[in-house]
Image (cartoon, rainbow, N blue to C red):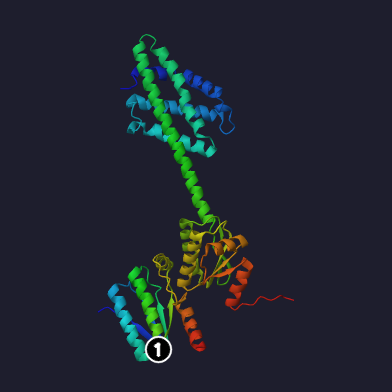
Amino acid sequence: MERIPILRMGEFLLVTIQVDMHDQLALTLQEDLAERIRKTSAKGVLIDISALEIVDSFIGRMISTIAGLSKIMDAQTVLVGMQPAVAITLVELGLSLPGVATALDAERGMSLLRRRLKLS
Amino acid sequence: MAVLHARTIDAVRKNEPALLARWSQNLEASGATRDARISPQEMSTQARDFLRLMVDASATADASDTGAREWADTRAFLENLSRTRALQGFDSQDTASFIFSLKRVLFETIQHAYADSPQDQAGQMWAVSELLDSLGMHTVRSFQKSREEIIARQQEDLLELSTPVVKLWEGVLALPMIGTLDSQRTQVVMESLLERIVETGSEIAIIDITGVPTVDTLVAQHLLKTVTAIRLMGADCIISGVRPQIAQTIVHLGLDLQGIVTKANLADALAVALQRLEFRVTKAA
């Protein structure tokens, strides 16, 4: 079955979405990520969606759920690399993802995560 | 059926120089040639070309149907004429009267040629009248079309000109907005700003609304959308140039701009941006 890889980098988990998301893939990712956070007790999750070019309301909501879920499991979450078209679509759909930290690219996302973990 | 007889066409062809001279006189009398925007030579060349095209077309095709293939050259000539007239700044009346002033001259020619048969004379006059009317209408229509094209192009230019995204500092973009914000403009603004954020990797975008005359609920909603989209991309947004009247309206309308950093002017916004990027500006001496 198709899966989105979750990589471990020190205290962080790295999720890079390189393919177009479909509903089942998003659901699997949600379960996998929750499981991995529990197993590794990761302190930060970085989700890179720079390759994601199309979103619908379901995927938009899934992104928000995944971010919310890892936050509840005590892992800081940063969403990085959102494409302009995706951002516009999400705004038009009314999904403003409140409470989800964002960054322009993976590098900035990483430094944001480090900063946050140092503070807390 | 309004069809031009071969006899009419012959009469026009034979009398071409005289006809053109009369037409020029008519044009002159109406004041069209005294216009500085177009020279009398140019006018008479246009007149000659048009007359030839029209006569050639009516010799082969039905004069009552100017939409036919045989009239394509004439139509193209008129479209070109309208376009150049529109660019020269003539109005539609000037352009149409160029065609309509030919009517009288052609009537005289027909009157002369059919002096012996009043019935044919009337028929041919009607045919010529209809033909010129339809050509004149075509001219006006294409004149209007080219004017509309000019307006549409200018509107597009204005849209792009009024939304420049400028780089203020390494990592700081500014967008000075001028004019009213509507859905279409917001879309253009949002897209160009987001594209530039990706391109330059800027972390802070300043939207300056000094040039926005009024802010109502709709405009505020558009602004909020833009700000949210920028935040989703991972950059921060500051709104600057909030004038006292606008601040008052926003409060009166009960608009919720929470979560948006607003500043009175661009300088303050830039100061905040520099501070966030951990830059410090100091005096040299």
Query: Would you place residue B115 above or below residue B270 in this image?
Result: above
Q: In the image, A10: left or right of B213?
A: left
Is residue B175 visible in the rendered image? The answer is: no
- For the C terminus of chain B, the quadrant is bottom right
Question: What residue occupies the far left of the structure in this picture?
Answer: A1
Image x and y of residue A41, in percent: 38, 90
Residue annotated with mark 1: A42
Residue A94 to residue B74: above or below: below
Q: Where A48 sits versus B23, above or below?
A: below
Q: Chain of mark 1?
A: A
Give amino acid for label 1: Ala
B154 in relation to B271, above or below: above
Q: Quadrant of the N terminus of chain B?
A: top left
Where residue A6 appears, as percent x and y from the top left, is 35, 83
Q: Residue at x 39, y 84 (%)?
A: A72
Name which quarter of the figure residue B269 lies in. Answer: bottom right
Residue placed furthest toward the top: B116
x, y (%) of residue B14? 42, 17
- How many residues crowd mark 1 within 10 Å: few (<14), some (14–19), many (20+)? many
Q: Quadrant of residue B276?
A: bottom right
Residue B163: percent from the left, percent from the top?
53, 58
